[in-house]
Image (tube, grey):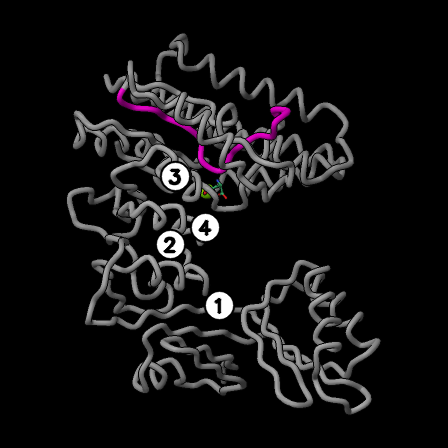
Amino acid sequence: MLVFKFGGASVKSAEAVKNIGEVLKRYPDEQIAIVISAMGKTTNALEVITDHYFHRRKKELTKCFSDLKKYHLDIMDELFPNPTHDAHRGIRSLFEEMEARLGKPHTMNYDFDYDQIVSYGELLSTTIVSGWLMEAGIKNRWIDIRRYLKSDNTYREAKVDWELSSRLIRQAFHFKDTRLYITQGFLASTINDMTTTLGREGSDFTAAILAHILKADSVTIWKDVPGVLNADPKWFDDTVKLEKISYLDAIELAYYGATVIHPKTIKPLQNRNINLYVKSFLEPDTEGTLVANLNYEKLIPSFIFKMDQVLIRISPKDFSFIAEDNLEKIFGYLSGYGIKINLMQNSAVSFHICTNNDKRKVRSLIDDLEKDFRVSYETGLELITIRYFDQSTIDRVMINKDLLLEQRFKQNIQLVVRDRG
Ligand code: ASP
Ligand code: MG
């Protein structure tokens, strides 16, 4: 069997939904579990809705909710012009449920409420796609993944209960009376059936979980790009598509911030040696990128750019060295504020951290650090990572930049730079 994952862009409009049918027609006999994200930018919109709801901004909440509803209903009207078509009922009742929830007071637990609300994105998208495929004569079964994918209660970053989920998922996806299942990415639920989510962009991970548990032959992530590129086309005109990359390269690229594949996706596949294809849903007949257990000679450099970075320099006030006790304190603050280190480096008397400039968190961190350390920092920086670098690739990205800090580790180089403007 195969696992397909369709992301937000592949279901952002009625035309896009129809296109999924076109892609599936290329696989008339295969057994496929299809994992789908929320439509377009729906998850972002639901995050805003959650925020208005939690802070009781009634007017804004009503406006955002009705915008989101209109977006989905417009797509429905295009797909099912007949207003009495059965498909409308499911969507209407999801919106009613959602409205009822938004009318109730919040629970004081932001992350809990977030998951209960944001999860509607995937419930809506999968209901729409499943209905459309039926309409197009492609029989399928809609599955509420929350009944089978079980997690702990870390809302917004739920940890999967692999043992229980394996048992339940194998029972649910038996392929006895259907060859196509449609289900939600990103969602799970606790043992008490409270909805959880697996972290932003978590649908790739869902696809990997299903593939691992069901021992799939392969996973295909359908995207609006032709495959894994060696840089974000936002930064370079002449990006190249990587024909194939190893699991390790995929993990490294995702870890350093390449956004094509979610970092958690690879491990469950690698453990079972399951091939991953990244392909374009716009050109389904062209080869995408294969991620697998591979060795290759020709190493194509890949570039990852992170903007809006802050570089923090920390040194003990008493001129002591940077040692274990200092580091313990620094890391304590970092983990307390949930600050992700993009790069760190130490010398005898100072310690450097490069991180995303999340202003609120960084401000609190610096206030705390200043109790014990001398702290200076610079914002507005860029962090450039090159995998398989050589001097010419460094020269290329350093044009018009000042180098503040550099770190080399095996095949990777990371450069913290300031743009000369
Ligand atoms: N819809 C969720 C998000 O945007 C999950 C996903 O797309 O992978 O984060
Ligand atoms: Mg999404």
Characterize the local packing of mark 3: few (<14), some (14-19) or many (20 or more) Cα atoms within 10 angstroms.
many
Residue visible at 73% across and 66% down in the picture: 333
Q: Was residue 209 drawn as part of the magenta stretch in this picture?
A: no
Q: Marks 4 and 1, Cα distance to the nearest angstrom?
A: 19 Å
Name the residue carrying label 1.
306
Percent across and percent down for residue 363 are: 74, 67
Name the residue carrying label 3.
207
- Whether residues under marks 1 and 2 lie with C-beta atoms below 8 angstroms apart, the answer is no
Percent across and percent down for residue 118 are: 57, 35
Q: Which amino acid, mark 2?
A: Val
Q: Secondary structure at mark 4?
A: helix
Name the residue carrying label 2.
260
Name the residue carrying label 4.
264
- Whether residues under marks 1 and 3 lie with C-beta atoms below 8 angstroms apart, the answer is no
Q: Marks 1 and 2, Cα distance to the nearest angstrom?
A: 14 Å
Q: Which amino acid, mark 4?
A: Lys
Characterize the local packing of mark 2: few (<14), some (14-19) or many (20 or more) Cα atoms within 10 angstroms.
some
Q: Is residue 421 visible?
A: no
Q: Which residues are magenta?
A: 179-193
Residue visible at 47% across and 23% down in the picture: 144
Percent across and percent down for residue 70 are: 50, 28
